[in-house]
């Protein structure tokens, strides 16, 4: 049996917000997270993203979701790729839109919002919020401190029930 290799993630949690927050005004915007499929793959311009999101969408084992503001669903703020492992959710990729990266980013809170959503999917599927992912070594401590993630071994990390519920309640009020 071929063992799949997961690419270590290197996203940074810039701030845990109640939604996403404009960096210059502090204004908070309600968000929506919607699944992408082959029919709406054209919403993702390859040149705007570091990862090949078309391949993620084409992979039938994965689900790709886009994060937008509620008042502007055509502008993608961030993307996440997850897989249902039947007892937990595995996070394969997560990425901020190019305008939400580096020191000139437009919005804070995009990665936290997406991770909280993945935890919510886990809860909704009856997996008690368990979310696993592989992290770059240099970011393990960062994820422990910001996402309350637990370092399992090697690069593998997971978010357990209490941490997941904490993240979900931060972003999803209903």
Image (cartoon, rainbow, N blue to C red):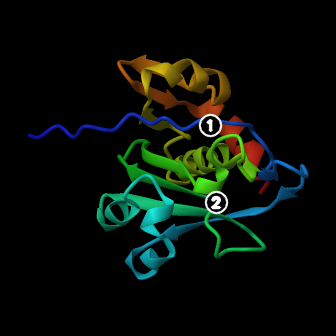
| Picture coordinates of residue 117, whole percent (x, y) | 60, 51
| Picture coordinates of residue 7, whole percent (x, y) | 34, 38
Q: Give the quadrant of the N terminus.
A: top left
Residue at x 45% of width, y 64% of height: 47
* Position above or below: 9 against 65: above
Foreground: 46 or 158?
46
121 left or right of 27 in image: left
Crowd tier of the residue under label 1, counting other residues whose Cα lies within 10 Å: few below 14, some 14–19, many 20 or above = many
| Picture coordinates of residue 158, whole percent (x, y) | 48, 29
- Residue that label 1 marks: 164
Q: Give the quadrant of the C terminus.
A: bottom right
Upstream in sequence: badge 1 or badge 2: 2
| Cα separation between marks 1 and 2 | 22 Å
9 left or right of 169 in image: left
| Picture coordinates of residue 120, whole percent (x, y) | 60, 50
Residues at circles 1 and 2 in contact by the CB criterion of under 8 Å: no
72 left or right of 50 in image: right
- Residue that label 2 marks: 77
Secondary structure, mark 2, is loop
Residue at x 44% of width, y 36% of height: 9
């Amino acid at each position: 049996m071929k063992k799949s290799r997961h690419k270590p993630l290197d996203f940074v949690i810039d701030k845990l917000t109640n939604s996403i927050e404009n960096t210059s005004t502090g204004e908070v915007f309600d968000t929506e997270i919607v699944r992408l499929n082959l029919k709406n793959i054209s919403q993702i311009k390859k040149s705007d993203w570091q990862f090949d999101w078309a391949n993620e969408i084409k992979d039938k084992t994965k689900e790709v979701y886009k994060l937008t503001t509620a008042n502007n669903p055509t502008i993608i703020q961030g993307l996440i790729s997850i897989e249902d492992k039947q007892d937990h959710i595995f996070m394969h990729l997560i990425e901020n839109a190019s305008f939400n990266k580096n020191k000139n980013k437009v919005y804070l809170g995009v990665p936290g919002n997406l991770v909280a959503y993945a935890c919510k999917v886990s809860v909704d599927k009856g997996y008690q919020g368990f979310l696993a992912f592989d992290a770059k070594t240099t970011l393990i401590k960062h994820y422990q401190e910001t996402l309350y993630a637990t370092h399992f071994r090697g690069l593998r990390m997971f978010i357990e029930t209490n941490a997941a519920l904490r993240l979900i309640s931060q972003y999803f009020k209903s």
